[in-house]
Image (spheres, rainbow, N blue to C red):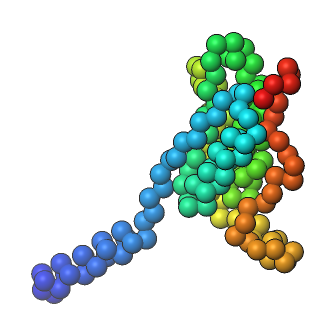
Amino acid sequence: MDYGKWKYEESQRQRDSRRKSTNVSIKEMKYRPKIGTGDFDTKTRKVEKFLDEGHKVKVTIMFRGRETQHPELGRRILDHVAERVIHLGRVEVMPKLDGRNMTMVLAPDKKAKAAWEAQRKAEGEPADEAPSANGAEAPVDETGEN
């Protein structure tokens, strides 16, 4: 076997392996405990877009001052985000509190996306639209403020 032929085949194998590899980057979306419904919906749509593109998403709740005494508010928001994007992704790292931030990592889930698209097709609705919030609002703290 001559060296030129071997070198060519080796370069072809390397090219094929590069083609099959995927680059998964981590995007981050930051929320606050007292986020409004409009801001929550906008940020959650961006999270859906990132998951649809195949990126992992790190969702961070930033606490300030006395907000650190109520981590359940942040947990409620993270649960609501996970619920809204269940058709595109799954929770890879459960919410955990580290310092003044609570983080959760979402990963794209091809099986869930395929099942969701099949369900939408069966219902006769376009599959490229995200499910509506059905009037669901962002969680509200105990004082009624948002």
Q: Work out whether 33 lies above or below 93.
A: above
Quadrant occupied by the N terminus: bottom left
Left or right, 89 with reference to 30: right
Q: Residue furthest left?
A: 3
Left or right, 3 with reference to 11: left
Name the quadrant containing residue 111.
bottom right
Q: Where does residue 12 sit, x and y in percent of width and height?
A: 28, 79
Asked whether residue 96 is in view, the answer is no
Numbered disc total: 0
- Please give the name of the residue rendered at 64% of the width and 22% of the height, measured from the top-left corner: 63
Quadrant occupied by the C terminus: top right
- Please give the name of the residue rendered at 73% of the width and 61% of the height, measured from the top-left corner: 130
Q: Nearer the viewer, residue 104 or 69?
A: 69
Q: Where does residue 75 sit, x and y in percent of width and height?
A: 74, 31
Name the quadrant containing residue 108.
bottom right
Q: Work out whether 40 lies above or below 122.
A: above
Q: Where does residue 144 sit, x and y in percent of width and height?
A: 86, 25
Name the quadrant containing residue 81.
top right
Q: Nearer the viewer, residue 6 or 19?
A: 19
- Please give the name of the residue rendered at 78% of the width and 60% of the height, measured from the top-left corner: 131
Asked whether residue 13 is in view, the answer is yes
- Please give the name of the residue rendered at 78% of the width and 33% of the height, measured from the top-left corner: 76
Q: Work out whether 81 lies above or below 18.
A: above
Q: Nearer the viewer, residue 135 or 22?
A: 135
Left or right, 97 with reference to 55: right
Left or right, 47 with reference to 21: right
